[in-house]
Image (cartoon, helix red, strand yellow):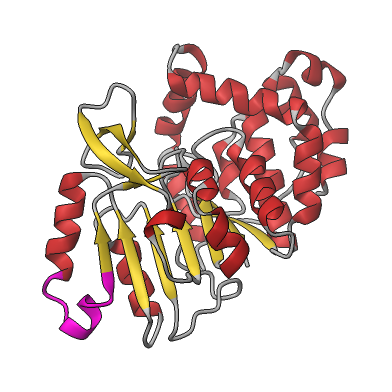
Amino acid sequence: MTIDEFYSCIHPAVKKTKNADLLEEQIRDIQFPKNPHAQKFMVSLCAPLVTKYRMDRRFVDTPLKKFWQEARDGIFTHEKEYRVLYDLLADDKSRRTLISMLQYRLTEDIKTYHREGDFAFKQYFDKKIVSLNDQEVFVNCGGYRGDVTEMFINSVGDFSRTYFYEPDPKNYAIAVDYFSSWQKDVLDKIVFRNCCIGKENETVSFNASEAEDSHISATGSTAIQMVSLDEDILEPVSFIKMDIEGFERDALEGAKNHITSDHPKLAVCVYHKPDDLWEIPKLIREYDEEYTLYLRQYSPYPWWPCETVIYAV
């Protein structure tokens, strides 16, 4: 299905009322490539949870409901931007992933979202997209407890340096403790930073939940340092990964000089805010129009739309 076919199949009444039931009736018979059998099994297994989740999100007044409404309305208010993104994406897999996400936002059918899920490669390290060498300077923004840093190290024979940014104090401590037992020649090339990434250097309030969704918040109880990558890293970088709970756009602005000067590979999450899906690729291309864009979706949860990544190489 192309972007033209997607928009043409939407009944005019849906565009006016945003009525998901009407849309489902219009596109019920459209077929998408299937997911791996294991993912299909998990979706079926969790169907009762999915149903409850959909009902809760539709009728309960929560931030998630607001996200849902903005995401669905954005299909129409930002049609031009989605069409531009569709044309910029480099391969059929990326374009199918975008269409499946737009269809999900309109129909709330989680199976549609997962039909283009990519489980052949590890998140952020798709070997068909990202090529690594032994001189990489890898920047991990949103390091959590070190899993992606470890994944990077295990993916290369050698590397120059890797920067680890994690603002949650306990997650940071767990990561530092874990890597402390590694051999010294590897440990010496890991730069640990207990801070968050943004547009500029300042002190911010932080909600330290000790989980993957720790985030900057005006009501956060923890004061923490925010830094920009341009000011904090003085050497050229070759690969930047970002999963920082909705602050990816700010962090990219704070890394503009590195992006324009070094042309690093980028793997950036685009699912935390409704418009991140098109705004982040647009920002990346504004900084460097030579970037080639790929969209992939890695969500392991049958009931939750997450782990969507834009690659720029």
Q: Is residue 64 part of the magenta span, yes or no?
A: no
Q: Quadrant of the C terminus?
A: bottom right
- Provide the residue span drawn in magenta: 180-190
State left or right for residue 272 relative to residue 31: left
Report the front residue among 237 and 186: 237
Residue 102 picture quarter: top right
Residue 91 picture quarter: bottom right
Residue 21 is situated, as x and y percent measured from the top left of the image, at 69, 21
- Residue at 55 percent of width and 38 percent of height: 110
Report the front residue among 195 and 56: 195
Residue 164 is situated, as x and y percent measured from the top left of the image, at 31, 61
Residue 61 is situated, as x and y percent measured from the top left of the image, at 45, 11
State left or right for residue 280 relative to residue 25: left
Residue 202 is situated, as x and y percent measured from the top left of the image, at 34, 38
The vertical placement of 220 against 117, above or below, is: above
Report the front residue among 201 and 95: 201
The vertical placement of 55 against 205, above or below, is: above
Residue 268 seen from this side: yes
- Residue at 52 percent of width and 17 percent of height: 58
The vertical placement of 274 against 61, above or below, is: below
Report the front residue among 234 and 292: 234
